[in-house]
Amino acid sequence: MGELILDLIPVALGVVLSPLAIMALVAVLLSQNARANGIAYLLGWFLGLAGLMALFLWLFPVLQVHQRGEPPLWVPLVRLLVGLFLVASAVWVYRKGRVHVLQMAAASTPRDVVAASPQLPGWLHSVESFRPGRTLLLGIGLFVLNPVDASCAIIAALDITLSDVDPAAGVWVAAAFVVVGTLPIALPVVYVVVRGRDAQPLLDRVRTWIAGNTHVLNAALLLVIGALQLQKALAALL
């Protein structure tokens, strides 16, 4: 159990510090009806993370990753591909993040946030007028369709499936992973729900900090996670 938790810590941090999700959240919390939209976005993010984890926790046993005591060849190959993708993503996140730091720090409306974050979909320019239903879909889509966050969830499900913990303990570990991955979205949303307009000064400070630091932290985490996956893949293949 302890070894599994240690393996999952960097993967969980990769979800926690997702710049795409946090920048979209900032836009949502600056929109009209920020409380309802914030709750809808939080619910969507939770459903995306929990749903993807549940899918692969079901799928990997069906694919018999424990067949004859050793994972089949496709398991290290998946780790190899995911590791290469995450290392490349780390380089991309770092280079792109530096370009938009000042523009993001100066953003004061949802439109400004989206303009400072070209990786966000263009239709987010209309986030000011989003209703909760559409914001819910945004939360789900930004996790499930974001290859970095989705890769972290898949890695977590694979590590849990390959571990020696019993199925009940694996479910608890997966639930803890989902809770930790949801916290960076939940805490700002709860704060806005409680404080309303009084939350704006803190949101401005958080946005400024995110603009200046998140891309560096996220790039470093992606690099670490990618390197760990490459190490596991090569150890199994060689």
Image (cartoon, rainbow, N blue to C red):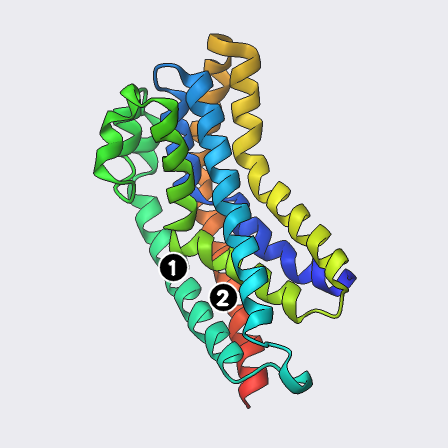
Residue 101 image point, x, y percent = 34, 37
Q: Mark 2 highlights which residue?
A: 226
| SS type, badge 1 | helix
At label 1, the amino acid type is: Ser
The residue depicted at 32 percent of the width and 20 percent of the height is 108
Looking at the picture, how far across and down is residue 38, in whole percent? 46, 24
Q: Is residue 46 visible?
A: yes
Residue bearing the label numbered 1: 89
Q: Is residue 44 above or below residue 231?
A: above
Q: Is residue 152 left or right of residue 30?
A: right
Instruction: Tell which of 118 and 210 is nearer to you.
Output: 118
In what element is the residue under mark 2?
helix
Q: Quadrant of residue 28?
A: top left
Residue furthest to the front: 62
- Residue beneath the point at 50% across and 32% down: 42
Q: Residue at the spot x=46%, y=36% of the render?
A: 44
Q: Which residue shows up at 29% across the image and 40% down it?
A: 120
Question: From what the image shows, is residue 128 above or below residue 124?
Answer: above
Figure quadrant of the N terminus: bottom right
Amino acid of disc 2: Gly
Circle nearer the N terminus (2, 1): 1
Q: For this rendering, which residue is in front, 88 or 77?
A: 77
Q: Is residue 228 visible?
A: no
Where is residue 67? Give x, y as percent: 63, 82
User: Considering only vertical position in the picture, is 125 above or below 47?
Assistant: above
Q: Is residue 55 left or right of residue 92?
A: right
Instruction: Please tell me how crowded label 2 is: few (under 14), some (14-19), or many (20+) other residues with Cα within 10 Å.
Output: many
